[in-house]
Amino acid sequence: MTRVLIADDQDLVRSGLRFVLEVAGLEVVGEAVDGAEAFAQAERLRPDVVLMDVRMPGTDGIAATRRIVDAGLDTRVLILTTFDLDEHVFAALRAGASGFLLKDVGRQQLVEAVRVVAAGDALFAPTVLRRLVSHYVNRPPSPPPFAGLADLTPREREILQLIGRGLSNTDIAAELVISMATVKTHVRHLLQKLALRDRAQAVVLAYETGLVSPGSAPFHPTA
């Protein structure tokens, strides 16, 4: 059973999320009212997923996400917020969040998102992926060359590009006409070579290094 920690400063929101998740058969192991408590409980309870709000008093969700990732916990963070402002999106992804959804998401979509993130995949609301594209189209990045890309095989680079466009493993397998097992092997190898925690960081890297061109249309992701 997937174990979830809910971090939100509003009692009513936490209660509603707990109800939705438990009805769907997920286990809510704890609740936190701010980022500091979220980190402390994540460290103690080791949930599979933290459903994390961004704006909370004291330590916010971005800082809490960074602390969870820096501590080396296996816990994944799914950002769920009312605000999809650019600074929140990019800060959350760079901090190590594995997904980003808005609070107007439907019940079933929320449950599926938690399961997807718990399984090790990344998940983005379509509006978030479009913001990533818009950001790098309007303000092209100019980072120093990322040496790790040279270590990738041509197939791994191709798969990294598809991940950057928002394709899931299933979508990549169909696009390249290869098996799911082969896709998973390539994804695992490229994450290891690039020292990336998960697919969310791979998406950011693909854009920041220019591997995904500004003209690439974002795929509407399912995972």
Image: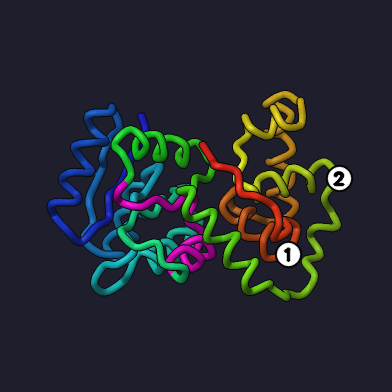
Q: x%, y% of residue 151?
A: 84, 54
Does residue 101 belong to the magenta stretch? yes
In the image, residue 200 above or below residue 35: above
State the mark number for residue 48: none
Q: x%, y% of residue 144?
A: 77, 75
User: Position of 5 compared to 211: left or right?
Assistant: left
Tell me what residue is drawn at x 23 percent, y 43 percent: 17
Q: Earlier in the sequence, mark 2 or mark 1?
A: 2
Does residue 22 belong to the magenta stretch? no
Tell me what residue is drawn at x 72 percent, y 32 percent: 175
Tell me what residue is drawn at x 34 percent, y 35 percent: 111
Q: Nearer the viewer, residue 214 or 71?
A: 214
In the image, residue 20 above or below residue 200: above
| Secondary structure at numbered mark 2 | helix
In the image, residue 179 above or below residue 39: above
| Secondary structure at numbered mark 1 | loop
**Number of numbered discs:** 2
Mark 1 surroundings within 10 Å by alpha-carbon count, few (fewer than 14), some (14 through 19), many (20 or more): some
Which region of the structure is painted magenta? 88-104
* Colour setting: rainbow
Q: CA distance from mark 2 to mark 1?
A: 16 Å
Mark 2 surroundings within 10 Å by alpha-carbon count, few (fewer than 14), some (14 through 19), many (20 or more): few
Q: Nearer the viewer, residue 6 or 10?
A: 10
Q: x%, y% of residue 154?
A: 86, 45
Tell me what residue is drawn at x 26 percent, y 40 percent: 28
Instruction: Report the amino acid beneath label 1.
Output: Thr
State the mark number for residue 154: 2
Q: Nearer the viewer, residue 155 or 65?
A: 155
Q: Quadrant of residue 58?
A: bottom left
- The residue wearing badge 1 is 209
Instruction: Report the amino acid beneath label 2.
Output: Pro
